[in-house]
Image: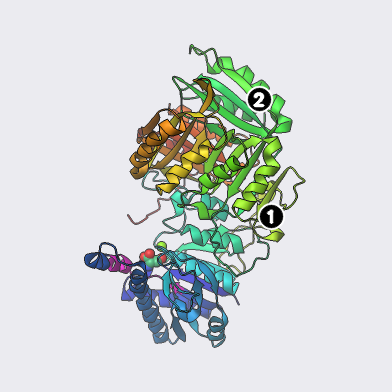
Amino acid sequence: MALVVQKYGGTSVGTVERIQAVAQRVKRTVDAGNSVVVVVSAMGKTTDGLVKLANEISTNPSRREMDMLLSTGEQVSIALLSMALQQLEQPAISLTGAQVGIVTEAEHSRARILRIETDRLKRHLQEGKVVVVAGFQGISSTNDLEITTLGRGGSDTSAVALAAALQADYCEIYTDVPGILTTDPRIVPDARLMAEITSDEMLELASLGAKVLHPRAVEIARNFGVPLVVRSSWSDEPGTWVMSAAPKPRSLEGLELSRAVDAVEFDTDQAKVSLLRVPDQPGVAARLFGEIASQKLNVDLIIQSIHEGNTNDIAFTVVKDSLKQAEAVASAIIPALCGGVPTSDAEVMVEQKIAKVSISGAGMIGRPGVAAQMFSTLAAAGINIQMISTSEVKVSCVVDAADCDRAIAALCAAFELTSSPLSQVAGVRSQEPGEIDQGIGDRGSGVESLRPPSPIPYPRSPISNHSLPPVRGVALDLKQARLAIRHIPDKPGMAAKVFQLLASQNISVDMIIQSQRCRVVNSVTTRDIAFTVAQMDAEAARQALQQAAPELGWGEVVVDPAIAKVSIVGAGMVNQPGVAARMFLALAQERINIQMIATSEIKVSCVVAEADGARALQTIHAAFELSGSEKIQVPA
Ligand code: ASP
Ligand code: MG
């Protein structure tokens, strides 16, 4: 007998008939011998309707009263579902977040869950009842017992948090799509349904998957090792399993981390190769990394910043042992890369004594200022940043190897993570004392330890290390604009200034890249920094940066709103050479120019022209053979 948490979204409980259908499914689950806790959203578009009502009365309603209002939606659906179950002679009881004891911060409209009382839930389960819990809401830990909500889409978070607190066997998220797809089916009609995905991959695919599954829910599943499955309410298809490695035992106090960063990672076994002034045209990255891959060299970080004139700089890191070989390949290929283009001043530079230092955490999604805090922390420690590369849940900086220990100590202090003496080549500092000193290679990709959802009511293939595909999904983001600041003085603290300025305007930055090329302007060494922000923030960002230019000594601020970001994500790419090369080749074959490249361990992102975005997505999806044979219907 298993303990199962099921969550049904708004459309799944949108009408009386649908509530009755949900009751049938819940009863079937109970009849199969399981204990069931059900979490429901408000019916259909109820929450939107309530927001509209509030806006008719006030342009700026108090957040407390909004929580009071919005939390009523779920109270309707829990009562109706409980009645529907009782009608089927299935004992059931509905409970609000407060009645369960879903204790949150006293932060209206975006509260995080601190802990969940399980006594009452367990008592009712013992009595043979189905417990129907209102999603999205909680109660503050203050004396006033304020009703709070978790933020829009928060019922997923309620469900996974309940599963973690109850140590449920698994959590099912029922929705109006059949699961998680390899890409956006509106652009790639043969997108395939994934049978499984790791939680790390899911977080990196936030822009693809966030509509299906709230990132905070994925974060809890990952931190507590909750087996999670996304399934359709309209069928018995198995859906998509979101797998997490068996976690280190972790306290249920402070269940949802309020911190944005939950680990500081480092790697001192890397060396950097930079190619300066190579032509800015389709096929260059493909040839370079194709050649590197054919030598079986595994590349870690890759960055390419925006072009200057008609040339680009591309930099990458490899393990130190491979440096000689990588340098040889890069030097040998330069004439070919420059063939026919009069930019003979291309050159290769290598740097042995570097360290990669990264911060990671799902909490940085949508939270401005996290990267800025990293940069300012490094600046305060007097550490210069040589390379920056970011992804959805990670910011990586390459610094001088001699600065590594100081960088980690400073970052652990700044982000309140446990630190311990450093002794090895690669590792992780995280907030749980038991979690420190894990090798980097064992993280995320450590599939042997992925906890199989058990017992499982559906047949599914066993997960083995070898079955991890290099690319799980491909995402396209058309809502970003690219900004570049020219000629930023190359000294500690400048990146910090740029991103603090943006954070103070509440502008979230997505992809950040610092160029390799140094330029001497008025006898000051300078570099460029390019990054992307949401299109709607681009003008505000440009103005703020332009205004600061005279004081901070940087040059022109260039904006290009017509860009697209296309990304591949897959935990299997960690140990497999040639994955990035394949992506670049697919783009080259379509004659699509790559404007920027940034990577993390399990993600490669390229910025291309907006007009090329859809074609880029299609060709990359096809190149990794992700197409399915069956057309998947998704609601508009
Ligand atoms: N009803 C809430 C909303 O619409 C919570 C949820 O459905 O997850 O945002
Ligand atoms: Mg939802």
Dot 2 falls on a residue whose secondary structure is strand
Location of residue 563 (image quadrant): top left
User: Is 436 situated left or right of 256 in this image?
Assistant: right
Give x and y (percent) for residue 339. 52, 13
User: Which label's residue is closer to the chain start, 1 or 2?
Assistant: 2
State yes or no: residue 47 in magenta: yes
In this view, the residue farthest toward the right is 423
Q: Which of 427 and 599 is in front in this view?
A: 427
Residue to which mark 2 is pinned = 350
In this view, the residue farthest toward the left is 56
Identify the image quadrant of the C terminus. Answer: bottom left
Hey, what amino acid is under mark 1?
Answer: Glu
Q: Which of 624 and 145 is in front in this view?
A: 145
Q: How far apart are marks 1 and 2 (CA)?
A: 36 Å
Give x and y (percent) for residue 294. 64, 28
Q: Are marks 1 and 2 in contact (CB under 8 Å)?
A: no
Does residue 225 appear in this view? no
Hey, what amino acid is under mark 2?
Answer: Val
Q: What stretch is highlighted in magenta?
A: 39-51
Ligand 1 sits in quadrant: bottom left
Discs 1/2, front: 2
State yes or no: residue 492 in magenta: no
Residue 448's label in the rendered image is 1
Q: How is the image coloured?
A: rainbow
Q: Residue at x 59, y 48 (%)?
A: 359
